[in-house]
Image (spheres, rainbow, N blue to C red):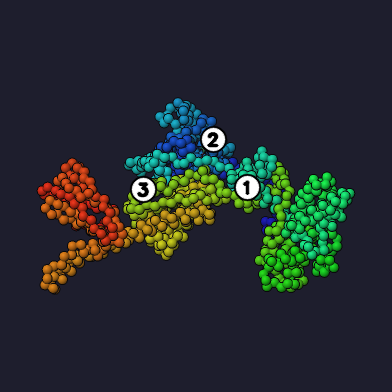
Amino acid sequence: MTSFQSTIGDEEGIAEELAEGQREISIAEFFEKNKHMLGFDSGARGLVTAVKEAVDNALDATEEAAVLPDIYIEIEEVGDYYRLIIEDNGPGITKEQLPKVFGKLLYGSRFHAREQSRGQQGIGISAAVLYSQLTSGQPAKITSRPKGQSRAQYFELIIDTDTNEPEIKADEETTWDRPHGTRIELEMEANMRARQQLHDYVKHTAVVNPHARLELREPGLDEPMKFERATDELPAETKEIRPHPHGVELGALIKMLEATESYSVSGFLQEEFTRVGKKTADSVIDNFRDVYYGRELAWSPPRAHDDRDVAAAVADAVANKGRDATTAFAEGVAETVANNDRLSRSELAEIVDNVAETVAGDTGKTFGGTVRENAVDAAWRAITGAGDDGAGNGADDEDGEGDDATESPLVPDAYALVDDATSTRKDDAAVRAMAEALARRFENLDGDAFRITRDDLDRLVADAATYVAEQHDATFGETARENVVEAFWSRARTVPDDPPKVKAIAGDRDAAADLLDAMRTTDILAPPTDCLAPITAELVEAGLRKEYDADFYAAATRDAEVHGGDPFIVEAGIAYGGEIPAEGSVELLRFANRVPLVYQRGACATTDVIKNIGWRNYGLDQPGGSGLPNGPAVISIHVASTNVPFTSESKDALANVPAIEDEIELAVREAARELKSYLNKRRSMQQRREKQDVLGRILPEMADKVSEVTGRSRPDIDGALARIMNNVSVEREVNGETVTLVVENHSDVNERLEITDIVSTEPTDLSDGTVVDMDGEWFVQWKPEVPSGDERELTYAVDGDADFEVSVGGVETEKLTVNA
Ligand SMILES: Nc1ncnc2c1ncn2[C@@H]1O[C@H](COP(=O)(O)OP(=O)(O)OP(=O)(O)O)[C@@H](O)[C@H]1O
């Protein structure tokens, strides 16, 4: 078989030939070829994207400068091209920065900032400039007047795609009637086929930015589309935050380690990350010690009946200190050791140090470093047999059976742990074999301190299990092995060694990976949320009210959550009924950091979540029980984050991040629950209305029939409807000059009503209530509370013939029968 792989080696100089064609690609060239990645895949879409990039920037800039945004958008047809003009009243851009902002891709102020903003990448507006110059050959024309300057700066520029640098065609001072702000003029090959998306973008921008005033003029509109502010309140100011330890990647961590001025890991963690104080830094460092150095296994010291004698061993190891001091020291160590359930070698060394100090204080004899080390060695040998050639010699034990004359002191300990960690059904011989196999392997670890990482412990236990399976026909399955590992690991001790210094970790990728591992496994408070500015439930609802004429509105804002170290907040709103079209599926409004997402609805996590909610439970029609629900509703979802996970650079759709999807679902369900109770109530009122209509029709017919059949006079049916329907009834009785409104409450709850009677002549002698003269009409008003099953009489007097008109509030019309 001849393949490229098999022949390539035969030809000489291919690499050289290829090398001739290899050269650096400028970012601008790359984006020139990959326009679709940035949302400039067609003329129709390109126009919408350019508007979006400029308006998003205008909103970011005005908010940063704490100015209420006033944004003007104009699209004009100029021969075969379209001219796009965007003006804002932001802080403007300095003369030095302006060419770079518009004439250099990947240049911006937000990429490195952990703060909620619409712009994230520093590509948006320069990509629009690039698209404009590629399709029309015209430079971008920018006017900017920084706040406080009397004159504006005017630039014409294009991007040099070879160097990704601005090429300035004109640079002059000019006057501009806006006191501050930026004006962008771009010409491009485009069309208005995406008019709907453009309108949606502008309208939806107004919905989630109720503090902004927007105006759009375009050739298809007779009148400009104007969106007024619904509030004069700017969104809450956001603060930049440092990265969260749970959100950095290895490469970023190494860069931070290289750049920091901190010397110690503790200082580095506290200085460079959010939510890390001394205590959290200590926990991270402890976790780092565990992965980097491993833990020290801890063993039970000998008990009273044991032959092993710590005091004797220590006494033997001490020379020239005199009997009293030696005995005090040896017994002090032995006693403290015996008070511990388990000890690691480092803990033993600490005990020896402490006892040495105490005895020195009491006897005046000093115990130097070498004596202490000897004492530790001797006591450790007595506890574990480590360093003792007589006990356990796994390395030389060919068959590994461990049938030596002297059993290692580790075996009983290991036996107890294995027995405890495995099910009661394990036979005793298997447990014993496992304990012996483990003890032999522990003895073969480097050094006498039994240091081991969790990964090595996993391997060691697996190896022992394989041996036991082969030699003793006893299986230790995965769970049993995990339990055994956990039994030893949880009793092992974190080592006291200091971590390496920051510079050493920066130069050692494995150590840096261990540090990252430790940061991720440490419980750390979620990042602060003052870097986020949610719209708030109240304004989500206000935004919907402003743009949608509906019967019902609800909104919910969730508490902040964290994804990959970045905090985020999800908000949802629902508008229902009214003028919202009832046909087809509901309208879904998607927003990220207050920017409407108009493309790629099907690829967006928000859409997936909505489709997977059972909307029938909330009173909306959903054919097949899944997918977008049908009906006269608008559902809006806003995700605010310091780092919104988009599916691509064009920032059209949210990626499927489970933590964010969960919050979207909870926010939507919260608003949907309110919709459900509204719809339930509406339905029951509808049924009530239908029932009353029927009763209203048949009650008089029945009365007539009864009178006809019985031959008696027609029964009085006044008040019957109200009684049958458990309504509140209001009846008027006029007796001479006295007018009485009789209020009867047939419902099973107490009612607080507001009754207004408009009378054409001046009323006197009011039973209670108030009267107001309004241009020859008198408004008599009562606010009676009528308990269930009770009645109230409201009276007044009028002189002569009067006209009346009563209105009753405080109870739904469906629960009211008025006969007045
Ligand atoms: N109208 C404006 N007023 C003031 N500053 C602006 C304006 N437009 C852009 N800028 C500045 O120019 C920078 C670059 O803007 P650009 O649109 O290229 O990227 P971005 O908004 O930071 O990110 P993205 O690529 O995600 O949109 C912004 O970060 C901001 O500092």
Residue tagged 3: 545
The residue type indicated by label 3 comes to Arg
User: Of marks 1 and 2, which one's residue comes earlier in the chain?
Assistant: 2
Q: Is residue 555 left or right of residue 359?
A: left
Q: Residues within 10 Å of mark 1 (few under 14, many from 20)?
A: some
Q: Position of residue 257 (x, y in %)?
A: 66, 43
Is the residue marked 2 within 8 Å of ligand 1, measured from its CB? Answer: no
Residue at image position (67%, 51%) is 287
Q: Position of residue 620 (x, y in %)?
A: 38, 60
Q: Is residue 296 left or right of residue 120?
A: right
Q: Residues within 10 Å of mark 3 (few under 14, many from 20)?
A: some
The label shown at residue 280 is: 1
User: Of marks 3 and 1, which one's residue comes earlier in the chain?
Assistant: 1
The label shown at residue 100 is: 2
Q: Is residue 306 left or right of residue 532?
A: right
Residue at image position (55%, 51%) is 563
Tell me the CA gap for discs 3 and 1: 46 Å
In the structure shown, which secondary structural element does the residue marked by tag 1 occupy? helix
Of residue 182 and residue 736, the one placed in the foreground of this image is 736
The reply to whether residue 366 is visible in this rendering is no
